């Protein structure tokens, strides 16, 4: 069983900001006219409104009290914003350093690749070669010859080829009518004697 001291210590630590996001955190503020609940900015606005109302009713003590409550949350909010800004600047600095390191590595890698290309003659830029063969000098029609394109007709003095008659499809031999006839391959069952 826990002692009452440890329980009360844990209870007191609950309401303290733990360095988290104070800007959007919801607080319960016990002011002179009851509890005010909301984010620090909402609480500041509410206490400022209450201070204006107290001034209009000529209650200077209550107005000062509300202003002090608003000032407390204003300090809390400004400290949280300073911390967030410092954290953001630190992250930006780290990101710039990482990016600079990546840029250096990329530049070194490109230099190594360029040196390797210069050392390898296959990677060096090759000169353009022009084809002066007679086929290359003929004007291109832009068409590609395919097997479906018509074949040129043979010259008139060539002997005419005899055209083959179309083949007839093969016909199968009919199966043997009797089962007991030996087929000659030795697979047939022997007759009982």
Image: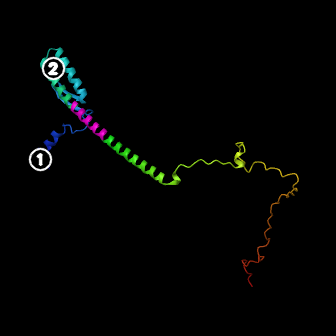
Q: Residues within 10 Å of mark 2 (few under 14, many from 20)?
A: many
Task: Find disc 2 in the rendering and name its residue.
Answer: 63
Q: How is the image coloured?
A: rainbow
Q: Residue furthest bottom?
A: 193
82 or 35, which lies in front? Answer: 82
Indicate which label's residue lies in the foreground, 2 or 1.
2
Left or right of 120: which side holds 73?
A: left
Q: Which numbered disc flags the more N-terminal residue, 2 or 1?
A: 1
Helix, strand or loop for disc 1: loop
Quadrant occupied by the C terminus:
bottom right
Give x and y (percent) for residue 145: 72, 48
1 or 191, which lies in front? Answer: 1
The part of the chain drawn in magenta is: 78-93
Numbered circles on residues, count: 2
81 inside magenta stretch: yes
**Looking at the picture, does residue 42 appear above or below residue 176?**
above
In 3D space, how far apart are the residues under numbered discs 2 and 1 (Cα atoms)?
42 Å
Give x and y (percent) for residue 107: 40, 46
Prevailing secondary structure of the magenta residues = helix
Q: Residue at x 13, y 17 (%)?
A: 60
89 or 182, which lies in front? Answer: 89
CB under 8 Å between discs 2 and 1: no
Left or right of 33: which side holds 109?
A: right
Give x and y (percent) for residue 167: 82, 59
Give x and y (percent) for residue 51: 18, 20
94 or 103, which lies in front? Answer: 103
Task: Find disc 1 in the rendering and name its residue.
Answer: 3
72 inside magenta stretch: no
**Looking at the picture, does residue 51 appear above or below residue 193?**
above
């Amino acid at each position: 069983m826990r002692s009452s001291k440890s329980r009360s210590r844990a209870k007191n630590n609950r309401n303290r900001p733990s360095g988290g996001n104070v800007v959007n955190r919801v607080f319960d503020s016990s002011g002179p006219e009851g509890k005010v609940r909301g984010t620090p900015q909402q609480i500041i606005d509410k206490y400022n409104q209450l201070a204006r109302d107290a001034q209009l009713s000529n209650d200077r003590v209550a107005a000062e009290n509300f202003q002090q409550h608003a000032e407390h949350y204003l300090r809390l909010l400004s400290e949280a914003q300073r911390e967030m800004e410092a954290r953001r600047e630190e992250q930006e600095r780290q990101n710039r350093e990482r990016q600079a390191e990546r840029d250096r590595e990329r530049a070194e890698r490109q230099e190594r690749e360029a040196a390797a290309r210069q050392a390898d003659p296959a990677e060096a830029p090759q000169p353009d070669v022009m084809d002066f063969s007679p086929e290359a000098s003929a004007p291109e029609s832009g068409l590609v010859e395919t097997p479906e394109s018509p074949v040129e007709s043979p010259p008139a003095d060539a002997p005419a080829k005899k055209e083959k008659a179309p083949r007839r499809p093969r016909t199968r031999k009919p199966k043997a009518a009797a089962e007991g006839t030996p087929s000659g391959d030795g697979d047939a069952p022997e007759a009982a004697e």
